[in-house]
Image (tube, rainbow, N blue to C red):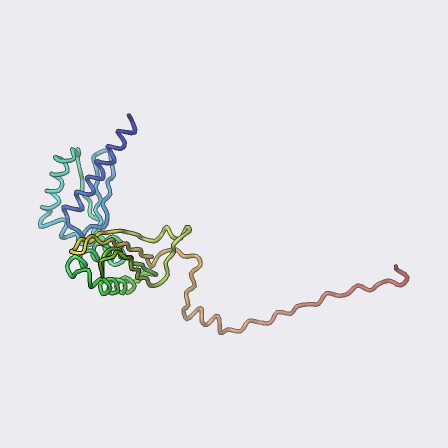
């Protein structure tokens, strides 16, 4: 009985997230999280366009709050906006932007879209990025294309700091899948070597020679066998 209640609770929470993303529009929302507090439910919306999400004088937030109360039976929902300062370092926003570009420009220009977005990600300061497109993009047969640049961890503990996201683009050729992985500039990489002026100066400075003393041989006593 408890398991069934927990599953229904998570389904309702997923329904809230999907509704908020669909209502506010594709490409504007990075993530939606629901936190439960003693005074009600706090819904945190991460976006790069807070003005478009809030609306004029907060009318969109008020309308969204009314729908959440009526449709999802929330007691006291409180919507909080978390602004994303650099959208090109957010994997979900990048994946949605690629999907929208493929839907507008067509699937034949997928290479132009992918390379342009990859350059913008690296120009924003990312240590590495990877974009994988799959589907019937250039022909009738489905195929996957990979575009990568920089340094990107795939396995181990450092791979957890990589921001990953997925999206879908619907066009005439069918549905295309999009995967985006971004390594942010502040990611802790222990085996990373930064070649700067201090590092080059250290290489040019000759180290003092180290004298190695030879071990002294013990003299054998006469008559010893």
Decide: is 98 above or below 204: above
Quarter-of-image position of residue 154: bottom left
Identified at 9% across, 48% down, the residue is 57
Given residues 133 and 219, the one toward you in this image is: 133
The answer to whether residue 213 is visible is yes
The answer to whether residue 85 is visible is no
For the view shown, which residue lies furthest in the front direction? 140
Decide: is 164 above or below 222: above
Given residues 222 and 177, the one toward you in this image is: 177
Identified at 42% across, 51% down, the residue is 156
Q: Quadrant of the C terminus?
A: bottom right
Give the number of callouts: 0
Quarter-of-image position of residue 90: bottom left
Quarter-of-image position of residue 41: top left
Identified at 17% across, 44% down, the residue is 20
Decide: is 167 above or below 78: below
The x and y percentages for residue 166 are 26, 51
Q: Quadrant of the N terminus?
A: top left
């Amino acid at each position: 009985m408890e398991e069934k209640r927990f599953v229904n609770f998570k389904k309702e929470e997923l329904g809230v997230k999907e509704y908020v993303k669909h209502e506010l529009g594709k490409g504007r929302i990075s993530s939606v999280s629901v936190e439960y507090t003693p005074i009600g439910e706090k819904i945190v919306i991460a976006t790069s366009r807070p003005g478009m999400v809030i609306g004029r004088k907060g009318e969109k937030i008020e309308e969204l709050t009314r729908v959440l109360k009526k449709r999802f039976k929330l007691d006291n929902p409180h919507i909080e906006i978390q602004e994303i300062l650099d959208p090109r370092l957010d994997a979900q926003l990048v994946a949605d932007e690629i999907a929208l570009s493929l839907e507008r420009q067509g699937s034949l220009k997928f290479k132009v879209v992918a390379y342009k977005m990859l350059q913008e990600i690296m120009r924003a300061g990312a240590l590495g990025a990877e974009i994988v497109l799959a589907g019937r993009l250039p022909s009738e047969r489905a195929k996957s294309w990979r575009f990568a640049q920089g340094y990107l961890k795939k396995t181990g503990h450092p791979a957890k700091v990589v921001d990953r996201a997925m999206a879908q683009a619907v066009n005439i050729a069918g549905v295309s899948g999009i995967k985006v992985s971004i390594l942010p500039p502040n990611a802790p990489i222990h085996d990373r070597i930064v070649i700067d002026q201090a590092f080059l100066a250290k290489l040019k400075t000759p180290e003092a020679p180290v004298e190695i003393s030879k071990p002294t041989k013990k003299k054998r006593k006469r008559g010893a066998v």
